[in-house]
Image (tube, rainbow, N blue to C red):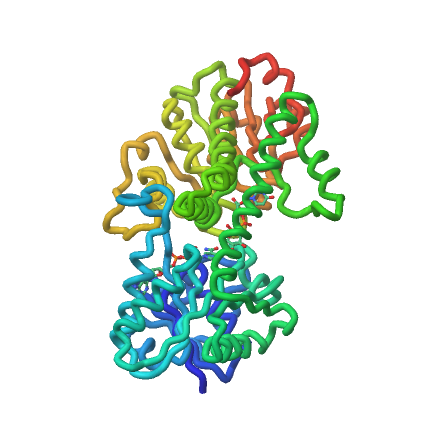
Amino acid sequence: MVKICCIGAGYVGGPTMAVIAVKCPSIEVAVVDISVSRIQAWNNDVLPIYEPGLDEVVKQCRGKNLFFSTDVERHVAEADIVFVSVNTPTKTRGLGAGKAADLTYWESAARMIADVSKSDKIVVEKSTVPVKTAEAIERILTHNSKGIKYQILSNPEFLAEGTAIQDLFNPDRVLIGGRETSDGRKAVETLKSVYAHWVPEDKILCTNLWSAELSKLAANAFLAQRISSVNAMSALCEATGADVAQVAHAIGTDSRIGPKFLKASVGFGGSCFQKDILNLVYICECNGLAEVAGYWRQVIKVNDYQKSRFVNRVVSSMFNTVAGKKVAILGFAFKKDTGDTRETAAIDVCKGLIGDKAHLRIYDPQVSEDQIQRDLALNKFEWDHPAHLQPAAGEAAKQVSVVGDAYEASKGAHAVCVMTEWEEFKGLDYGRIYEGMQKPAFVFDGRNVVDVEKLREIGFIVYSIGKPLDPWLKDMPAVA
Ligand code: NAD
Ligand code: UDX
């Protein structure tokens, strides 16, 4: 029986390995992590992450050929293939701080593999890493090898949260990069045979190591760039009376552009886009490509602009101050169908409103109060570093309460801000919400989920990203 071990039981390691286990009953899969609480949760009824369809997959194979364990060293020693799916956050200190990837976790995993291995291994980069990381990992492993042979493969993951299981069951492609030597090609074939259990052969792409590593950063940069492009258009739509949804539809029907990933929003979030583009920018700078770095940096700048533009819109519409006013925040996760809040636009928007002394009442169907308070107390880039280094709920906590539903959040509020496109926000009884609010009652929709006309009929003053402006908003000072 082939044995697989995955180091890192997070949003990628957990679902990916569960799908390998369910699709390959002849393979034993162990997912290991240094976090005891995370592994306990994986072995429990309530899994550590919310992901549609994940529970069923885990239940089918946990305890049969899928195991979650903190016995990292034993499982690594026994494995034929070791996936490394640890976090690769943005560095917060030292050389490249604020841009470069922090490979501390990766390096310590590699050193541990070298320490405990007693047989030849294929080591698979599942984490998103800078180009040429495989070379560094190879050096760590071979300099400590004790005669053991390692083959390093790059096998980046393209799943999106909220749709992880369907993405893993039916991927657009699986990408495997390896050394162009006979041992390298053999290793690629071994990993290919794992995916071939359920992925059609023509969807398994094999490249050299550096192409695979760079393709992951490139894919995320291209995806994020589409969002910043449509978000930049949304600002122009508001200034001209065009409707960004109509513009997106019109350009998306051009088959060369395509309709997906053109939804204007308050800004992209998630653990990947910003981190990976900053990483790409840093690599470009290190290679003397200042113009290329500047081009990609602009994607992040537009995203930051979109978030601050939203805050400015809220404040300027409400007579230029939200001090002491109650604002309901509907949704805190970075997108629907996940409880993940990493880099969610809601954090920056809430911090902006708190900075202007607003009182926030926040509701999200999947995010806990504790998580929200911690997120609002954190500094930029700190979220992906160990919990013991993170601050407890800070000053912001005094201005924030977290409640159990959208009606409670909006009761007595001056304004409602929609931050996440949860389906339930489309079907709310906005008449009831209006009745319970202070007047004039504002809705600021950062996700284009509300029916603008219907809400205006009810009596709301409505702002929806990239839509023709409410006459009220037109009269307010211009938003920078
Ligand atoms: P995560 O933080 O959810 O999980 C990483 C896990 O690794 C943590 O549980 C941590 O405790 C564990 N870990 C760290 N060092 C360890 C060590 N030495 N030994 C054992 N366990 C260790 O992160 P994630 O979202 O799963 O992302 C993992 C990687 O995959 C990142 O490089 C990310 O960029 C990439 N990625 C993420 C997504 C996504 O949607 N989240 C998608 C594609 C790629
Ligand atoms: C992303 C990539 O899609 C995935 O391939 C990669 O493996 C990890 O990073 P993820 O961050 O989980 O996945 O979610 P995604 O669906 O890409 O959304 C990212 C952010 O962009 C969210 O905040 C989402 O709301 C926003 N978004 C997405 C938009 O604002 N408009 C869109 O049209 C699409």
- Is residue 37 placed above or below 301 in the rendered structure? below
Residue 8, located in which quarter of the rendered image? bottom left
Pick the residue in front: 341 or 52. Answer: 341
Q: Residue at x 53, y 19 (%)?
A: 479
Query: How many numbered dots are placed on residues in this image?
Result: 0
| Furthest residue in direction front, as rendered | 288
In the figure, is residue 31 to the left or right of 240? left
Nearest the eye: 251 or 313: 251
**Left or right, 13 with reference to 220:** left
Could you tell me residue 455's position as x and y percent? 64, 28
Asked where in the image residue 288 lies, by quadrant, the reply is: top left
**Could one spot residue 233 in this view of the protein?**
yes
Which quarter of the figure is the N terminus placed in? bottom left
Residue 192 quadrant: bottom right
The one nearer the camera, 369 or 408, is 369
Q: Is residue 430 left or right of residue 354?
A: right
Residue closest to the far bottom: 1
Q: Is residue 406 visible?
A: no
- Residue 396 in percent (x, y) is at 32, 32
Q: In the displayed structure, would residue 221 be above or below residue 160?
A: above
Residue located at (63% from left, 26% from top): 236
Q: Residue 29: percent from the left, percent from the top?
A: 43, 77
Q: Position of residue 273 (x, y in %)?
A: 48, 47
Residue at 28% from the left image edge and 51% from the top image edge: 387
